Image: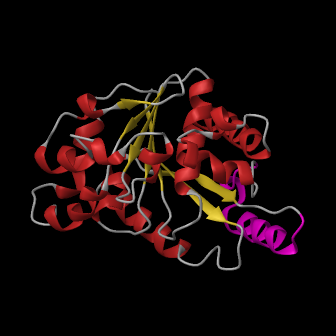
Amino acid sequence: MKHVIAVVNQKGGVGKTTTAINLGAYLAKLDKTVLIVDLDPQANSTSGLGIDKNSLETTLYEILLRSSDAAAAVKPSQTPKLSLLPTNERLAAAEIDLADQEEREYRLKKAIEHLDYDYILIDCPPALGLLSINALAAANYVLIPVQAEYYALEGLSQLLGIVQRVRGGLNPNLELLGVVLTMYHSRTTLSDQVKDELQRHFQDKLFETVIPRNVRLAEAPSHGLTIADHDRWSKGAKAYKQLAKELDKKVGG
């Protein structure tokens, strides 16, 4: 069964891209076929997997606006079984260019529904616009990375409201898979307070695995590598390995 997961939070800097590519890498190491869909015009998943975003002929923009073939645009990564549907800054125009298109909310769903992967992880932009709505309309699950900081819960109610509205109209099969705490610092009281607050709000929807602040995690994208290939013995690598196992078990593999 194919699992399509939208990795979404309208706040920037919470670890969406880091989570998408490193979770994807360790799902691939569980012998799953994985596709990362870079739906963020900043194209961090694309560059983070070592792909030159300026040399692309076909990107997600052409797929969404011109019905270009998604399968033909897929790029392999250096991690076996992990592939990427790339993008670049052209995608920034999609919000405007899609506005007057028919079935504009379903463009991504139609583009990827025929692709054969065990997991498709959609790296969403830090906004709840039409691109993120496309992701939610295409997904089975929502995964929300939340940074261990003072304003962690700010905006989450709005995001959950959007998810509920999409489930009530565009996609009745959409389900909240869970919330994962990122950039966790075990030595600070604040990180523990945020974790406790998330536990109260989300209960069993909060993943047991927490992602620590880790220099090696931050370094990996500059080398075009996942943490699995950059430093598999780091704390960040061990955390994403554990998260992949927890997530795979939660959705039934």
Q: Residue at x 81, y 63 (%)?
A: 185
Total numbered labels: 0
Q: Principal SS element in the magenta part?
A: helix
Q: Residue at x 72, y 37 (%)?
A: 231
- In the depicted view, which residue is nearer to us: 45 or 152? 45
Residue 28 visible in the snapshot: yes
Residue 171 visible in the snapshot: no
Q: Which corner quadrant holds the N terminus?
A: top left
Q: Does the magenta stretch include residue 47?
A: no
Q: Is residue 223 above or below residue 189?
A: above
Q: Residue at x 75, y 58 (%)?
A: 213
Q: Which corner quadrant holds the C terminus?
A: top right
Q: In this view, does 237 lie above or below 147?
A: above
Left or right of 69 on screen, residue 221: right
Find the residue positioned furthest to the right: 187
The spot of residue 154 in percent (x, y) is: 58, 78
The magenta segment: 187-208
The spot of residue 43 in percent (x, y) is: 39, 53
- In the depicted view, which residue is nearer to us: 119 or 232? 232
| Res. 167 image quadrant | bottom left
Left or right of 201 on screen, residue 75: left
The spot of residue 220 in percent (x, y) is: 62, 45
Q: Which residue is drawn at 86% across and 61% down?
A: 186
| Res. 76 image quadrant | top left
The spot of residue 37 in percent (x, y) is: 39, 43
Left or right of 79 on screen, residue 173: left
